[in-house]
Amino acid sequence: MSDMSELLYGYELLLFKRFQTHPDTWLEWRQKILEKTLDDGMIEDLDDIGSIPQSLWFLSVALHKRQKYLIQLIKSEVMREKQGLIRKSGETLFSTYLNAHRFTEFHLDSIFKYGEENSLPLEIFKCPNLSYLSLKYNCLYELPADIGRLQKLRYLALTNNKLHVQSLPYSLIFCQSLETLLLDNNLLDALPGFLLQIPSLETVHRHGNHNYFKSTFMWYHTDVHYRIIPIMGNKDSQKRQQHTLQFLAAQCVIGSKKDFFSDPSVAPVLKDFICSIYDKFSICHFCEKAVYMGDPGYKVITFKNPYLGNTCVPFQHWACTKECAISIEVPARLEQIAAATELDTKYRMYIQECERAFFNNDHIESVCSCLGSSASDMESLSTKSSASRSTCIIS
C-alpha cells in the first residue's frame, strides 16, 4: 500500500448514502457543523454541535477522522447554492466529495449487514484513479457492470459474499490492469470463462465456494459430450415489449464485447444507459451476440491446467448456440489434453532418471539424493500425473 494513497472507508460511504436518501438530515447537520466551524476551518470541540444519535454513528466517525474533508464539502455546497449553480446531470453529493480528492483505495469491508439494502453507489465506480477495491463480507448478490470503468484497478476483493457465476458481469474484462481477484467463499461452482481474457491477472482466490470441489470432480470425470449443457430458458422471457432504437443499439454494443467505457465517441449518458440494462443480457463467450437473460442457450464447462499456479481449474462459459458451444469446448479440451500429455511425459522422464540412478552402482550418492531430497517432488508429480490420466480422449 503506497504512502501516497488516498483511502476511502466504509463509514464515509454509509454517511453519504444516508445523506442521499435523507436530504433533511444533510441540511440539518450541515447547518450545525457550519455554525461551530472556526475561521481555521475546524471545530474546536465536537461536543459543541450536540449529541449525535447512534443511527448516525458514521457521522461521528467522519467528524473525528475526516473533519477537514467534510467541512470543505459543506462550505463548497453552501457557496454553490449562494451562486445559484445547478448540479450537472448525474452529479451527487457523494460524487462531489469523491471528485474533490484523488482516492486510489476503497476499503469497504463489512459495511452492510445481512438483510439490509446493500446496493453499491455507482459513484464509486467513477473514480479513474482507483487501483484497490475491497468489498469483503457485504452479502453482495451481484456486481454492477460499472466495474468495467476502472481502468487502473489492480486489486479487487469480493470474499465472503453471495456471488455466483452469472452475477459477475462480463464487463470485468475491461479492467485490463487487474492483477488480484479474490472470489473465495461465494456461491461459485466454477470461475467465469471470461477471466481467461484478462492477461494481467496474477492471483485468483476461489476456494471455499459452495459445491466448488464437488462440481470440479464431477465435471472433470464426466464424458466430454456432457460438458455442453443445454439451458432451456424461461418462457416468460419471450413476452417482451417493443424497445427503442437506443435499447437495441445498446444491445449490439454489449454483444460486441468492445470496451465502450474507454470509447470517447460514446456519450457518458449512453454509457450509463448501457450499464443500467447490462444485466438483462447473456453474452455469448464465442460470437458477438447478446441475448435476453432467460433465453435458451448452452452452459459450457472447460478446464485450464495449469492456471496461475493451480491445476484442474474449471471455467464456465455461456454460448448462444450449439455451434458456439462446440467452438468453445473443443479447443479448450485439446489444450487440456496437450497439457496432461506434457505432464505425463515429464513424469515418465523423471521415473526413468531415477531408475537409471538406482541401478548405477557407481553413483550411490545419486541414488540417495534421488530417493531422499526429491521424494516430495516425485510424490507431487505422481499425483498430478494420476489426475491427468482421467482426461477424456476426443472421440
Image (cartoon, rainbow, N blue to C red):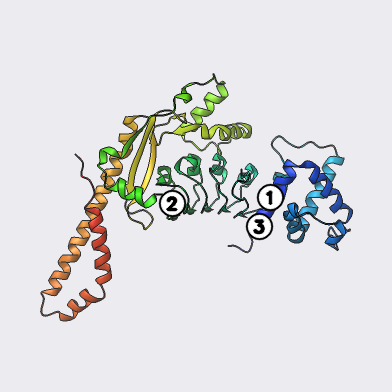
Q: Amino acid at mark 1?
A: Leu
Label whose residue precedes the other's in the sequence (1 or 2): 1
Could you classify mark 2 by the number of other residues whose Cα lies within 10 Å: few (under 14), some (14-19), or many (20 or more)?
A: many
Tell me: 104 left or right of 52: left
At 39% across and 49% down in the image, what residue appears? Answer: 211
Q: Residue furthest top?
A: 242
Label whose residue precedes the other's in the sequence (2 or 3): 3
Q: Is residue 343 visible?
A: no
Q: Which residue is mark 1?
A: 14
Q: Amino acid at mark 3?
A: Glu
Element at label 3: loop
Q: How far apart are the alpha carbons under marks 3 and 1? A: 18 Å
Q: Nearer the viewer, mark 2 or mark 3?
A: 2
Q: Which residue is mark 3?
A: 6
Contact (Cβ within 8 Å) of mark 2 with mark 3 = no
Contact (Cβ within 8 Å) of mark 3 with mark 1 = no
Tell me: 313 left or right of 173: left
Image quadrant for the N terminus?
Answer: bottom right
Q: Which residue is mark 2?
A: 209
At 72% across and 54% down in the image, what residue appears? Answer: 58
| Residue 179 at x, y percent in the picture | 48, 54
